[in-house]
Amino acid sequence: MALIDLFTRKPFALTPPAEAPEPRAWPEIGETWKPEGLRVAERYYNQAHAVVLVASTGQDPCGITYYLVACLGCHYLSTRTKYHSSYIRYALGQAAEAANTHASTCRALPRQLPDRPDDDTARGLLRSWVMAMPRRDLPLDLDLAEFDSGRLELQRTNEWICAELDALAAKRDDLLSARLDEHTGTVRFSILPPPR
Ligand SMILES: [Zn+2]
């Protein structure tokens, strides 16, 4: 065998570990909702077969993905988990655990999924959230994650949100500023101090 053959042959298929679980299909109840701007990572079913979603809204500026948990039966929605004396955003494992815990006790029937709002309504929602944000004596970085608890309602992508924030910053430069972060190449928004 020529030496080159060693490099061009396909590697042997890896043998899966003997105890690897069979991939199981989720019970199919027809729920295929994929809200815009939310990447659904996992689905659980509550006691009445309503879906409990584990979904992400994207990555933070450091490239870390966080998750939220939302029940499509009752209105349970969680974006943070208690960690010692503070609340932190969910990593996938923590979100899955919270979803599973909720699903095992919730008996709410599947509710009507929210319709995707039209652009005017979505814009109004986003602006109302920005207006309601606390303002301090110094500019405050605005993290898109601040909107996580409204993303089931908003149903828009991060790109759409950034474009809207950019437009708002141009219109309300007393409230919001937009600047290009040279390190990440992304636009960062800040909530400005209130007028004196
Ligand atoms: Zn529930």
Image (cartoon, rainbow, N blue to C red):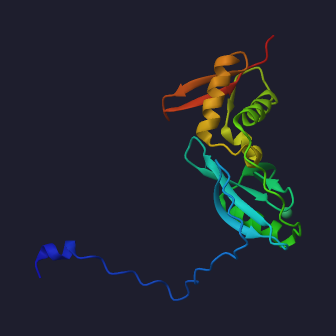
Quadrant placement of the C terminus: top right
Which quarter holds ligand 1? bottom right
> In this orientation, which residue lies closer to the viewer: 121 or 62?
121
- Please indicate whether residue 160 sits to the left or right of residue 139 in the image: left
Residue 45 vertical placement versus 95 (above, below): below
* Residue occupying the far top of the picture: 196
> In this orientation, which residue lies closer to the viewer: 157 or 19?
157
Name the spot of residue 94 as percent of width and height, x first.
Answer: 71, 62
Residue 71 vertical placement versus 163 (above, below): below
Number of marks in picture: 0
Q: Quadrant of residue 61?
A: top right
Q: Quadrant of residue 92?
A: bottom right
Quadrant placement of the N terminus: bottom left
Name the spot of residue 122 as percent of width and height, x first.
Answer: 73, 37
- Please indicate whether residue 79 sits to the left or right of residue 144 in the image: right
- Please indicate whether residue 42 sits to the left or right of residue 182 in the image: right
Residue 123 vertical placement versus 150 (above, below): above
Residue at x 68% of width, y 17% of height: 171
Residue at x 68% of width, y 54% of height: 67
Name the spot of residue 26 as percent of width and height, x first.
Answer: 67, 75
Name the spot of residue 83 as percent of width and height, x first.
Answer: 77, 54
* Residue occupying the far bottom of the picture: 18
- Please indicate whether residue 66 sits to the left or right of residue 153 in the image: left
Residue at x 77% of width, y 44% of height: 150
* Residue occupying the far right of the picture: 107
> In this orientation, which residue lies closer to the viewer: 116 or 84?
116
Residue at x 79% of width, y 54% of height: 78
